[in-house]
Image: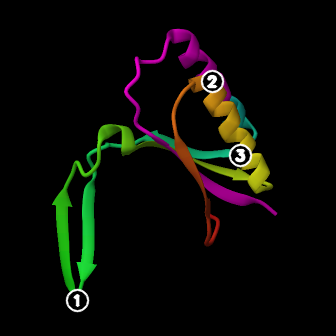
Amino acid sequence: MTMRFLMTTKGIDAAPPTPEVMAEMAAFVEEMTRAGVLLATGGLDPAGIHVSASGGKITVTDGPFTEAKEAIVSFALIETRSKEEAVEMSRRFWKIIGDGEGHIQQVFGPQG
């Protein structure tokens, strides 16, 4: 049985990655894809759009809502055998990228 996890990263004020870091990250993504662990990945607009519902009224507000360093700016949806394996994938990611912050959250619901 496998479990799905959403790994997200927050924005940081840092220099763009070097070509060497980009090559190492590309190799890591390729390895995870071939192994069937990586289901999807991408960058996110840090500004975003906020949607709220209250008493039947829907309110839509354009961002930004947080400081750039607090905004979620990328994600990876992975499928692993355990939470520990998901944490290990995250450790490998951060060893390549360097300083930063993110979250790992289990995804529930039908697998597709």
Residue 96 marker: 2
- Residue 43 x %, y %: 42, 39
Q: Amino acid at mark 3?
A: Val
How many angstroms separate mark 2 from mark 1 (CA)? 46 Å
| Quadrant containing the N terminus in the rendered view | bottom right
Q: Is residue 42 visible?
A: yes
Q: Does 91 lie within the magenta span? A: no
Would you call the spot at circle 3 few (<14 residues within 10 Å), some (14-19), or many (20 or more)? Answer: some
Question: Which residue of the protein is positioned furthest toward the bottom in this rendering?
Answer: 55
Q: Is residue 7 visible?
A: no
- Residue 88 x %, y %: 74, 41
- Residue 83 x %, y %: 74, 55
Residue 55 marker: 1
Residue 87 marker: 3
Would you call the spot at circle 2 few (<14 residues within 10 Å), some (14-19), or many (20 or more)? Answer: some
The residue under the point 63% across, 71% down is 110
Q: Amino acid at mark 1?
A: Gly
Q: Nearer the viewer, residue 2 or 88?
A: 88
The residue under the point 54% across, 27% down is 99
How many angstroms separate mark 1 from mark 3 (CA)? 39 Å
Query: Which numbered disc, 1 or 3, marks the residue that appears first in the sequence?
Result: 1
